[in-house]
Image: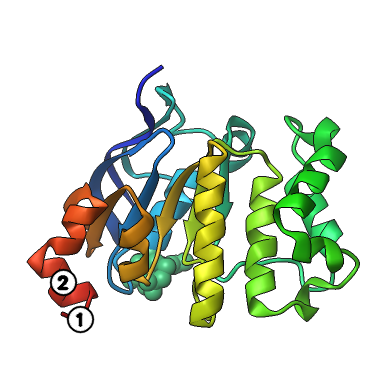
Amino acid sequence: MSDTLLELKNVSAGYGEVKVLKGVSLKVRRGSITALIGANGAGKTTLMRVVSGLIPVTQGTLALDAVDITREASSVRVERGISLIPEGRLIFPDFSVEENLKIGGYISRVRSRQSELIKQMYRFFPRLEERRNQAGETLSGGEQQMLAIARGLMADPRLLLLDEPSLGLAPQVVAQVFEKIQEVRSKGVTVFIVEQDVRSTLAFADYAYVLENGELQLEGPAADVRENPKVKESYLGL
Ligand SMILES: Nc1ncnc2c1ncn2[C@@H]1O[C@H](COP(=O)(O)OP(=O)(O)OP(=O)(O)O)[C@@H](O)[C@H]1O
Ligand SMILES: [Mg+2]
């Protein structure tokens, strides 16, 4: 089994005439927390959409566990174990916590294990169990983010993609979300995370990529990226 779980080779993608990603090559190591940082509009969300199959590539290839998934539909990628927690969380506001979880587990690979997975999620996020019958929209911001993560985990992923999980949350709550993400990794799930909170993210990620205008500018162990003068100036305000 190779060390690499996800590999992008020379990937370009965009929206019609708008070219966003320009020849991105990167690897996400199995069992790692890998971070993607970059300014607003750099193409981070676009890259997450490309990996989850929501938008097609115009050039290049993607492989999961050395299997080419470049042309696979997003539903097939979910079955293969790629789960995206999108920017803005996008939980179902009128559905209860438990209904939101069920939707996350409604794929053929895990459907027969749905109730077992829901129990696991309640053990992992006790607050969600206390609120299992409450509508999604009535949860606090932090609870909604936990629900979004739990819904993503209901697909029992190998690779969890997180797009800005800290967005709009109070610092204390952000710290709780980041702790949970590290617990997710300790359960054997590989994490690929986009974050604006660069300082905290580089403190717990193993490896990081910096994206600027659709191109990778820098990569390395997170501790090295954190010490990079350009990163310090542009993203850490030092
Ligand atoms: N659906 C779309 N149609 C056309 N252009 C889009 C669409 N979504 C994003 N873009 C453009 O693609 C570029 C990259 O957007 P993207 O959302 O990937 O950036 P980002 O790095 O995630 O930014 P942010 O940090 O603000 O979330 C931006 O210029 C954006 O305007
Ligand atoms: Mg984004």
Residue drawn at the location 37% of the way across and 56% of the way down: 204
Residue drawn at the location 87% of the way across and 41% of the way down: 115
Mark 2 and mark 1 residues within 8 Å of each other at the beta carbon: no
- The 10 Å Cα crowd at callout 1, few under 14, some 14 to 19, many 20 or more, is few
User: How is the model colour-coded?
Assistant: rainbow
Q: Which image quadrant is residue 128 in?
A: bottom right
Mark 2 lies on a secondary structure that is helix
Q: Residue lying farthest left?
A: 229
Instruction: Specify the quadrant that holds the C terminus.
Output: bottom left
- Give whichever of discs 2 and 1 has the lower sequence position: 2
Residue drawn at the location 20% of the way across and 81% of the way down: 237
- The 10 Å Cα crowd at callout 2, few under 14, some 14 to 19, many 20 or more, is some
The residues tagged by marks 2 and 1 sit, at their Cα atoms, a distance apart of: 6 Å
Which of 206/95 is in front?
206
- The amino acid on which the numbered mark 2 sits, given as a three-letter code, is Lys
- The amino acid on which the numbered mark 1 sits, given as a three-letter code, is Gly
Number of marks in the rendered image: 2
Residue annotated with mark 1: 237
Instruction: Specify the quadrant that holds the N terminus.
Output: top left
Which of 197/179 is in front?
179
Residue annotated with mark 2: 232
Image x and y of residue 25, in percent? 25, 41
Residue drawn at the location 45% of the way across and 45% of the way down: 51
* Residue 17 shows up from this direction: no
Image x and y of residue 30, in percent? 41, 33
Q: Is residue 156 above or below residue 87?
A: above
Mark 1 lies on a secondary structure that is loop
Q: Which image quadrant is residue 232 in?
A: bottom left
- Under 8 Å from ligand 1: the CB of mark 1? no
The quarter of the image that holds ligand 1 is bottom left
